Amino acid sequence: MTATAERLPTTAATGNVEAPLTLDEPPPRVLGWWDQIALWSNLGMSILGPVTAIYILQPYGLAQMSFVGAGLAIIVGTILGTLLVAAAAVPGAETGAPAMVLLRGLFGRRLSYLPTFVNVVQLVGWSVFEIVVIAAAAEQLFPWRGHRWPYVVVAGALTTVMAIRPLGVVRVLRRYAIAAVVVTTVYLYVELFTHHAPSLTHGSWSGFWPGADYAIAAAVSFVPLASDYTRHARSPRSAFGAAMIGYSVTQAASYILGLVAIATVVKASQAADTQTMFAAFIAVPVGWLAFGILVARELDQSFADSYSTVMSVQNVLPRFDRRALAVVVGVVATVLALALNINDYASFLSLLGSVFVPLTAVLLVDYFLGRRGRWDVGDDAPTRWVMVVPWLLGVVMYQLVYPGGVSWWVDRWTTVQGWLHFTPQSWMSASVMSFLLAAVLTLPLTLANRRRMAR
């Protein structure tokens, strides 16, 4: 890859063009508007979305919100989070660099290995988690109960095959998956609305920002993946617009579907149980078919995590064949899915993912206000230790406001809150405050560096 990434020319024909095997090869620009809409729409729709809705409706330690308040928190949080994803998609479209390679311009080549390592850990974890979820859903859908391993192996194998041909998968999503998902989602909404619903305005609003934080965090979890796909976009404008529209609409629809289910057929006390929520969808007329479509579509989540793991590893090993890396990642994820009980692992993965909110702020400020057009992603990109400071302070702010659900981690940060005489308030958003602090601290560093470069 060149020392300074330039905007690459658009590839006119798509055909069966695939992603390059190593970082030494330029990425083909074959993904148009509808390709990207299909990709982001499918990533926004998850069978875990309806389950997550209970954590927005009733944030930890707070009174249950009204359904209207929770729905608004979902919409606001989704829009804010997707704005970051869409903005992070632009540098990839402009430079042709994958997400972790872009961080060479921010931190330098060797220092970029730090966030790359964190990203690989969280992406492998999410790949495992998605394979387990797909297997659990398939086990509930089909009659062979008590035999989880065949579903895990099949899900892992399909994930691996999809990661080997990523651009082909995007074309399939455009042609078939998005239409099936839209029809299925609308059908489930219609069926659930036939049941009686309680008052939608009764409840508290105190958990609005903590609830919105869940939606923000879910969207921002795709920031470390965005450029892995938008490097193949035909234009930065299409990369931004497709991510913004495709992801925001479907994530909001997925979470609000959960609220509707809780308001009509699922008790709030049972909504966090995936089997209960899945059973509610299967129970509607022809629900097995609708739910089966959503389960099959969930494979694009595990595929995205696995393929982006490969792209992250290539930041360190740029000349390794991505197909071989995809097989290794797929095998590791499948074996871990067979061996681990990760019912509570999502909290730890969310903790890892929280580091990317302030990192996104540092990247966007430095890229758009500092050195856009002169973003060095080469092997000799100089180390910039100073840029680590706003990132880490942003992480600290996030943990002070919301340290997550891992008990030993929460205890440590509760102690820090006591030292600082800091008490989180219900109106505080960990994502927003973390992002703003990191952005404000990055700005003077970026402007000083821009003045230096202009001399």
Image: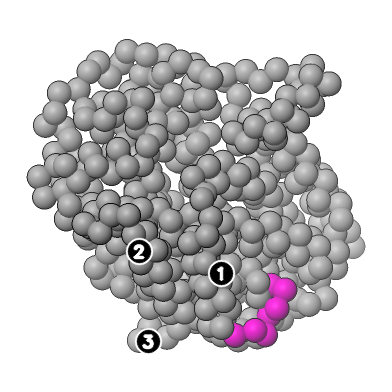
Residue at 75%, 65% in the rendered image: 113
| Location of residue 226 with respect to 194 vertically, above or below | below
Asked if residue 244 can be seen in this view, the reply is yes
The residue identified by callout 1 is 332
Q: As drawn, is 149 to the left or to the right of 141? A: right
Q: Residues within 10 Å of mark 2 (few under 14, many from 20)?
A: many
Quadrant in the picture for residue 53: top left
> Is residue 278 highlighted in magenta?
no
Residue at 51%, 50% in the rendered image: 341
Asked if residue 369 can be seen in this view, the reply is no
Residue at 30%, 68% in the rendered image: 174
Taken as a whole, is the magenta stretch helix, strand or loop?
A: loop
Residue at 56%, 41% in the rendered image: 347
Q: CA distance from mark 3 to mark 1?
A: 28 Å
Out of 229 and 347, give the one closest to the viewer. 347
| Location of residue 167 with respect to 74 vertically, above or below | below
Secondary structure under tag 1 reads helix
Q: As drawn, is 432 to the left or to the right of 143? A: right
> What's under tag 1, amino acid-wise?
Val
| Location of residue 13 with respect to 140 vertically, above or below | below
Q: Which residues are magenta?
A: 315-321
Out of 123 and 168, give the one closest to the viewer. 123
> What's under tag 3, amino acid-wise?
Asn
Quadrant in the picture for residue 20: bottom right
**Residue 389: percent from left, percent from top:** 83, 46
Out of 269 and 204, give the one closest to the viewer. 269
Which of the image's four quarters has the N terminus? bottom right
Q: Nearer the viewer, mark 3 or mark 2?
A: 2
In the rendered structure, which disc, 3 or 1, sits on the residue that comes first in sequence? 3
The residue identified by callout 2 is 151
Secondary structure under tag 3 reads loop
**Residue 289: percent from left, percent from top:** 16, 55
